[in-house]
Amino acid sequence: MRDLDLGDGIVVPANLLRAATSRAGGPGGQNVNKVETRVTIEVDVDALPLPDDRKARIRERLTGRINKAGVLRVTSQAERSQLANRDRALARMEELLADAIAEQETRKPTRVSRAQKQRRIEEKKRRAQTKKLRSADYAD
């Protein structure tokens, strides 16, 4: 297994990752019944070489993927080979962790312009007039 590069010089060593294989479902014929192609990659969030604030950010943003023991789990079974699924799972784990630790830019509040509000009101009036003309009161 390879190390995970999260950018900004942050590297998760491969010895922190655990890989487990199991039989995958879906199409694949006899291959599905014989070969363990599904790969699950796990990493303990507390063991990651990151400051506590970034670990907390990972726990907050990936809550649904982290179990009670604090283990982040990613599974892949899309490919027919174990090797391809392992590469896919590692890439996904790398992507998830990199996105979770990234600083999000604070949103700068903006307002709708007066002209835009006016255009919206005019369009509503135009639409209401069109519907009014279609009503039974105006029918011939």
Image (cartoon, rainbow, N blue to C red):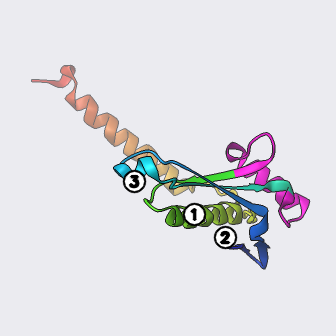
For the record, the magenta segment spans 47-72
* Residue marked by disc 3: 31
Q: Earlier in the sequence, mark 1 or mark 2?
A: 2
Kind of residue indicated by mark 1: Arg
Q: Residue at x 80, y 55 (%)?
A: 45
- Counting every numbered tag in the picture gives 3
Mark number displayed over residue 1: 2
Q: Earlier in the sequence, mark 2 or mark 3?
A: 2
Front position in the image: 47 or 28: 28
Q: Residue at x 78, y 50 (%)?
A: 59
Mark number displayed over residue 86: 1
Q: Residue at x 76, y 65 (%)?
A: 103
Q: Position of residue 27 (x, y in %)?
A: 36, 48
Q: Position of residue 54 (x, y in %)?
A: 83, 61
Callout 1 secondary element: helix
Q: CA distance from mark 1 to mark 2?
A: 8 Å
Check if mark 1's residue and mark 2's residue have beta carbons within 8 Å: yes
